[in-house]
Every structure is written in structure tokens, then in C-alpha cells.
Image (cartoon, rainbow, N blue to C red):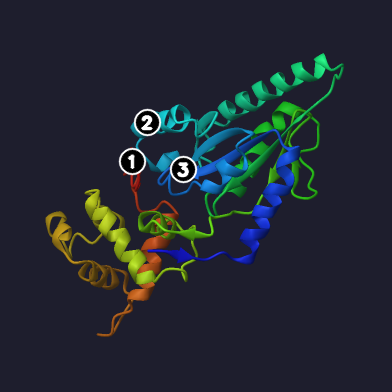
Amino acid sequence: MNINWYPGHMKKTKDLILENLKIIDLVIEILDARIPVSSKNPDISHLAKSKKKITVLNKVDLIDSKELKKWEDYFLKNRVSDYFVALSVEKGTNFNELRKITDSIYDEKMEKMKKKGLRKTEIRAMIVGIPNVGKSKFINKFVNKNKARVGNTPGFTRGKQWIKIDEKLELLDTPGVLGPKFEDEHVAYNLAITGSIKDNVLPLEEVAFKFLDKMKKLGKIENLIKVYNIEEYVSKEEVERLENYKILEILEKRLGISKTEEHNYDIIYRRILKDYRMGKIGKNNKKKINLYFERI
């Protein structure tokens, strides 16, 4: 598979990154914990090779916590990044750890400035990530988490998408950006399933079927029984052997999508993908069922 696509705004974002790299101190790249490798834009490492890099693994509430140490070792030992933080923007966890890292980078820069006779400085961080990785929510949460630290200081100011956190730290928000093409089918489908590629780039039927195939491979296909309450239609043992279109027929019947003999699979494709992207598939009441597509 070789998917060539590069919307105009993607090129503009890449140009924006290049233009501002010379005035920033570090790059914070937000990755999706379900697909850490697929959600990493290879261009970022190349463009920002001379800058300090923090890898932020978001949506860790959707994966097995046992996997986190493996990913930390992967990014740090392979020198993909200088720092690694695993957090959940949705849950608001572990932002203090990220702030400790930015503070240490500030202290390091401040020492260098003092040697030059300067007494005031700040660090500028560029926030990058693929579309729909949670970058905007991350920035909003990070701003709110740090308001208490600055007392009466205004929360943030915007201008050229700069967000001032406090006297130590300023963030540059950038639009989500992907590479210009996908030569790896695995990467392309992972990005499509998680919603980082628009649904019109790949055939929706193929994406939905690939999603079901991945669930079967992971031994998680029975999650659908729990999420959509289809116990009366199919057992756990049966669903593992069913062809994908049969599973869709059961979901169609259970959700009351089609009242006639004519199937409306398109609605089902969109429904299950939307539910997965929103974190609904992968949870059963209060019990979390991890559903991620990349492991080390």
C-alpha cells in the first residue's frame, strides 16, 4: 500500500515548524498510546534533531500499564527522545511529571544565561502531533494545571498561536501534521482506525473490517458483546468464529439500524469506529478492557 496524500494545510504546518524551530528550546511530541510508532511523524525527529525532545504518550488509560515501561525504554534507549512522559489528558494524570522536566530544562538554560550576565530567560516549547491525538486538549489541560503555580498571573495570551504559561514557559501550538505518504499498510490502517486520517482517505468498509480483524487477533472481539449487549444474539465462542459481515448484521439488528431486509452497513462502520475513538469500546461498565494495536 502506498497512500499519497498531502493536504495544503499539512505543508503549511511543516513550513511553520521549520520557520519556528530556530527560536524554540524543545519539542514536545504527543503520541497515541494505542499506536505509539504509527502516531509518530518521522519528519519531526529529522526536523528537530538539534532540539531537546519530550515524548508524551497520551491516552495511557486505554492501554495496559505494564506496556509503559517497555515504551519508555524504546524511546529513551533508542535515543528517539530525551525525555518520556506517559499521561492521560482525559484523566488529567501525570502533568506534574511533565512540568518537572520543563522546569529542569529552564534551570539548565538559566544557568547558561547567568554566565553571560543575564538574569531573565524563558523556555519555548513547540507542541507537535498528528491530527486527533489530543493535542488541543493537552494544551488546555496543561494551562489549567499550571494556573495555580502563577497565582494572579493571567492564564495565557495568544498571538501566532503562542500560549504563555508563566514567566518560565511558553508554548507554540501547531496544527496536527502527518507525513506526505504511507508506505506501510499497518501504519495507514492504525491511523485510519484511530481517526487521524479522514474517513474518506481509505474505504470505510476496509477500515472497519481491519478493526474487527485486529480485535480478533488480540482476542478482544468478545468486547463487542459486552459493549453492545448482544449476548442474546451470539456467544463469546461464536463471535470469535464469525465472519465480519455477520458481526455487522448482528450489530445492525441489535442497534435497530435497519428495519428492512436491506442492510445499512455504512452506519455500523461509522458507529463502531466512533465508539472506539471515543474510548467506549475497551470499557465494560467500570472495568477497563485494554484495546491497543502496537506492542513491543
Residue drawn where x is 59% and y is 34% of the image: 53
- Mark seen at residue 153: none
User: Mark 3 or mark 1, which is nearer the start of the sequence?
Assistant: 3
Q: In this view, does 191 lie to the left or right of 43?
A: left
Q: Nearer the viewer, residue 83 or 112?
A: 112
Image quadrant in which you'd find residue 70? top left
Q: What element carries label 2?
A: helix
Q: In this view, does 134 lie above or below 3?
A: above
Mark 1 or mark 3, whichever is nearer to me? 1
Quadrant location, the C terminus: top left
Q: Is residue 224 above or below residue 49?
A: below
Residue 255: x, y in percent?
32, 69
The residue tagged 1 is: 295
Among the 4 quarters of the image, the one containing residue 265: bottom left
What type is the residue that disc 2 sits on?
A: Lys
Tell me which label, 2 or 1, sits earlier in the chain.
Answer: 2
Q: Which of 258 and 172 is in front in this view?
A: 172
Q: Quickly name the residue at label 3.
A: 59
- Residue type beneath disc 1: Arg
At x 39% / y 28%, what residue is drawn?
Answer: 69
Q: In which quarter of the image is the N terminus?
A: bottom left
The answer to whether marks 2 and 1 mark residues whose Cβ atoms lie closer than 8 Å is: yes
* Label annotation for residue 70: 2
For residue 48, say whether it is visible: yes
Amino acid, disc 3: Lys
Residue visible at 67% across and 41% down in the picture: 126
Q: Identify the element where label 3 is drawn.
A: loop
Q: Residue 235 placed where, x, y %?
A: 14, 58
* Label 3, label 2: how far apart the Cα atoms are: 16 Å
Residue plotted at (54% across, 55% down) = 178
